[in-house]
Amino acid sequence: YKPRPAPPLCSMPGDADGDVESLLQTRQGFLSKLGGGQEKGHKWNRRWFVLRDNILMYFNSPKDFTGFRDKPSGVVLLEEANVRESGEGGYYGRPFTFVLSHSGGESVVLAAETEKEMVEWMQAVRTSRLCVTDAEAAAMSEAQRQQAAEADIDAAVHRRADAEAALATVDKELSEVQKTHREVEAEKERAEKELKELMARFKLRKSLLHWRHRKLTFSFRALVTIVFEGRIDKARGAKASADARMAAAQQELEAASAARQKAEVAKRKSEEMYVRELELKKQSEAEEREGDRLAAHEADLRAEAEQEVGVLKQAGLGKLSLDRERQECLDLRMQLERCRAEGELLQTKLKRRVPTGKSK
């Protein structure tokens, strides 16, 4: 039996024949480790793993591992460890995952890049020293465990052959689909070309129809003008007369509007004059009442003066007192004369103002 060589990410030192004994040698390569060291983690970390005997060490990068004396980032003891595949779907959608679990409950979840790498790592862990996969494997001898590993490798090779056959079938179907797609594209191009030709024909036909329509329209208009020329002239004359009547009516309307505006202005002026006349009439009546009051007051003063003069005459006072009283009477008479003159002047003004307001 001669297994297939390991992928480029894995280094499998040993002889070039790569027999089963090489699985028992030191194995190195990249694997992704689920953070937290348990199956409940959620972050994947890519690490460089080194397997020797029953110890699985991992480093941040291959540069960190120069020999077995280097301190690793972590160590997984494979003594009494159980290795199993995670099943379909993997963890968190990550394929090609497998689990290293111990009886104490601790577990480490690892993920390879391909199915082949996963199978080779699982076989390498199973064939390491003092590493058992289950209770039955614990009772097996080293030769039996190697035979079981060879059987698993054969099964993986067969699965890979089946996968390659399925891939070939998919490639064939893809080629047929691509061929069909090319045929559809060619048919699409032909259809687009035919559509462009049809569109060009449609545009040309549309242009011809438009030209014919315009020509027929012009011809129809000329025919109508020739046949109905008399009626058209009559209609134009009727339209002109109607326009003239409309213009005259418009002028009359404008004149009526102007007359109406003038009448409104005259009406407002007459109303204002009437209001002014009423105010003047009221004012003249008030002045006439005031003149009557002054005349009555003047008559009262005159009567009082005459009464005082009579009293002085009857009393028979001395000549000096009589002269003084006479002087006072003369002064009072002069005041009365002035009051009478002022009253007559006011009456004259009132008589003049009232006819003037009416004439306005």
Image (tube, rainbow, N blue to C red):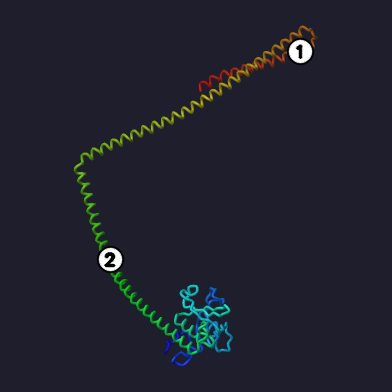
Q: Is residue 140 above or below residue 92?
A: below
Q: Residue 236, position in %: x, y?
A: 26, 39
Q: Residue 97, position in %: x, y?
A: 49, 78
Q: Is residue 55 above or below residue 179?
A: below
The answer to whether any part of residue 295 appears in the image is yes
The answer to whether any part of residue 62 appears in the image is no
Please identify the quadrant where the N terminus is shown.
bottom left
Q: Quadrant of residue 242?
A: top left
- Mark 2 highlights which residue? 191
Please name the residue shown 22% across and 52% down the image: 215
Q: Is residue 332 above or below residue 128?
A: above
Q: Earlier in the sequence, mark 1 or mark 2?
A: 2
- As shown in the figure, which amino acid type bears the numbered disc 1? Glu
Q: Residue 138, position in %: x, y?
A: 52, 85
User: Is residue 311 found left or right of 201 in the rendered image?
Assistant: right
Q: Residue 328, position in %: x, y?
A: 74, 14
Looking at the image, which residue sits at the far bottom? 15
State the residue in front, 356 or 269: 269
As helix, strand or loop, the secondary structure at mark 2 comes to: helix
State the residue in front, 348 or 198: 198
- Mark 1 highlights which residue? 325
Q: CA distance from mark 1 to mark 2?
A: 146 Å
- As shown in the figure, which amino acid type bears the numbered disc 2? Ala
Q: Quadrant of residue 281?
A: top right
Please name the residue shown 30% across and 72% down the image: 180
State the residue in front, 78 or 203: 78
As helix, strand or loop, the secondary structure at mark 1 comes to: helix
